[in-house]
Image (cartoon, rainbow, N blue to C red):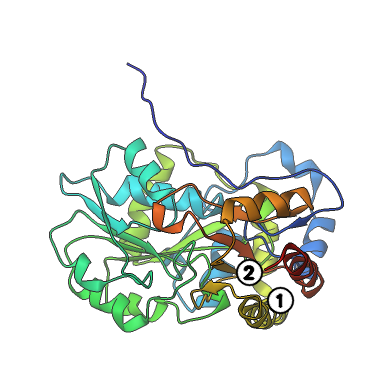
Amino acid sequence: MIRKVQPYVPGEQPNGTNIIKLNTNENPYPPSPFVEDALKNLDAGAFRRYPDPSASALVKEIAAYYGLEEGQVFVGVGSDDVLALAFLTCFHSDRPILFPDITYSFYDVWANLFCIPYEKAPLDDAFQIRPEDYKKENGGIVFPNPNAPTGILTPLEQVEEILCANTDVIVIVDEAYIDFGGSSALPLLKRYDNLLIAQTMSKSRSLAGMRIGFLLGSQKLIRYVNDCKYSFNSYTMSQAAIAIGAAAMRDKAYFLECTGNIIETREWAKGEFQRLNFSFADSLGNFLFVTHPKHSARKLFEALRQEGIFVRHFQGPERIQNYLRVTVGTREEMEALFSFLEKYGC
């Protein structure tokens, strides 16, 4: 019998040159110059051989950056890959896993694909996660921090509150956007061996096209995820991705410069959206989740698209159907966006 699932719908990848792409939370700046050097030094002749299945060069750089043992790091083809393997490895009881009702829409796709029971915990009226909703019997917990698509950060003490109430299951904190604000759950790894942290190089390190994600956790948990990986696909990371990812991790100064520029533009953009009467949560991601009292989000999305400005509109829960998620681009790109919104009558 064929398994049928409702797949995840990725953001549109438009072709063309005269476009402003603010719909998939990509970094508007190029990768580190270290990446360009790594590309120049790649030995094309070595591509005839399989890559290192442990991706040790990349794992070593990530571990050094975060002050962890190499056995506490797992890498894969983007955070989607490592999260899917974490689901497959850690969530296999008869009890439902828990995640927010408004969140990254891949979670229920993976749960359905892997036949994992799940329940969605409703965010409150301000789109906040309520820790008390995660203090009941469950088979595991996953949530992004900051959340997507809202950008709202759950304070570290509330993350620990959820962990403390669920020491018998695995809690995955998806930190795809943590580099743009807030505190990582990384310090909690010392106290909770049931914690897995997922991060990515797609956003803050400008490597969405290379697909590099990683998990941080106890050596025991990471070993279990590796066992699952080696039972599925041993050679997940290409030689190019390993070399480029390692190079990007070494350039901390450039990383801080880029994330600082995005944070600065985001905070300026908040003021511009307020000036045009948009409402939004106080995002700490590289995007803003905005709504306007007089304009349909769907119609505004279409009007922007016609102008060559791409943002994201979700057909998800009714509560967010009149919202747009807008990636923070360069200052020039954002100025073009606001110029159009003014002409539109916002």
**Residue drawn at (57%, 45%), measured in percent from left and top?**
10
Q: Which residue is mark 2?
A: 204
**Is residue 28 toward the left or the right of residue 227 in the image?**
right
Query: Is residue 139 in view?
Result: yes
Q: Secondary structure at mark 1?
A: helix
Q: Residues within 10 Å of mark 1 (few under 14, many from 20)?
A: many
**Residue drawn at (24%, 78%), measured in percent from left and top?**
161
Disc ID at residue 258: 1
Q: Secondary structure at mark 2?
A: loop
Q: Nearer the viewer, residue 336 or 96?
A: 336
Q: Residues within 10 Å of mark 2 (few under 14, many from 20)?
A: many
Q: Nearer the viewer, residue 222 or 295?
A: 295
The amino acid pointed to by label 2 is Ser
Question: In which quarter of the view is residue 223 placed?
Answer: bottom left
Q: Nearer the viewer, residue 160 or 283?
A: 283
Question: In which quarter of the view is residue 24 placed?
Answer: bottom right
Mark 2 in CB contact with mark 1 (< 8 angstroms): yes
Query: Is residue 64 in view?
Result: no
The amino acid pointed to by label 1 is Cys
Farthest residue in the left direction? 137
Query: Which comes sooner in the sequence, label 2 or label 1?
Result: 2
Q: Which image quarter is the C terminus in?
A: bottom right
**Residue drawn at (65%, 61%), measured in percent from left and top?**
245
Q: Give x and y (percent) for residue 277.
A: 60, 75
Q: Give x and y (percent) for residue 280.
A: 52, 73
